[in-house]
């Protein structure tokens, strides 16, 4: 998943969207009728809450030693 920051090409309204494909964000249209321009793209890793408690999803184990 990708977190994409977009801005309207006319009214300069800025939004953040989560998509699987950057092209999906570029095809979106602002409420004013103009298209969005992509400002930044970052990987997004969802964190799910359970009972008001945040839990972090585990990453695959790597053979890297932790720094002291």
Image (cartoon, helix red, strand yellow):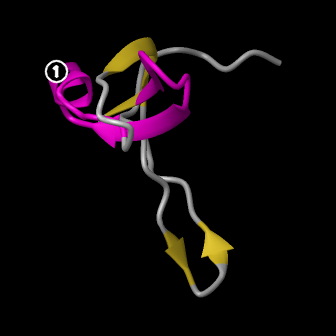
On the rendered structure, is 7 left or right of 27?
right
Residue 54, position as x, y percentages in the image: 62, 66
Residue at 42% x, 35% y is 44
Neighbor class of circle 1 (other Cα within 10 Å; few <14, some 14-19, many 20+) is few
Which of the image's four quarters has the N terminus? top left
Residue 13: quarter of image:
top right
Judge by depth and name the residue closer to the eye, 68 or 50: 50
State which quadrant residue 45 falls in. top left
The residue sitting at 40% across, 32% down in the picture is 61
Residue 56 lies, in percent from the top left, at 54, 54
As for residue 24 lying within the magenta part, the answer is: yes
Residue nearer the viewer, 55 or 37: 37
Q: Taking 34 as reference, is 29 above or below it?
A: below
Find out whether residue 16 is within the magenta segment.
yes
* Position above or below: 51 against 67: below
Q: Nearer the viewer, residue 52 or 10?
A: 10
- Mark 1 = which residue? 23
Q: Which quarter of the rendered picture does the C terminus lie within?
A: top right
Q: Position of residue 12 (x, y in %)?
A: 55, 22
In the rendered image, the residue lying farthest to the bottom is 51
Give the secondary structure at mark 1: helix
User: Which residue range is magenta in the image?
Assistant: 4-30
């Amino acid at each position: 998943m990708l977190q994409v920051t977009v801005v309207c090409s006319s009214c300069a309204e800025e939004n953040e969207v989560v998509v699987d494909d950057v092209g999906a964000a570029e095809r979106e249209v602002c409420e004013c009728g103009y298209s969005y321009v992509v400002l930044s793209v970052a990987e997004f890793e969802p964190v799910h809450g359970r009972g008001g408690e945040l839990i972090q999803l585990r990453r695959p184990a790597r053979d890297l030693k932790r720094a002291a």
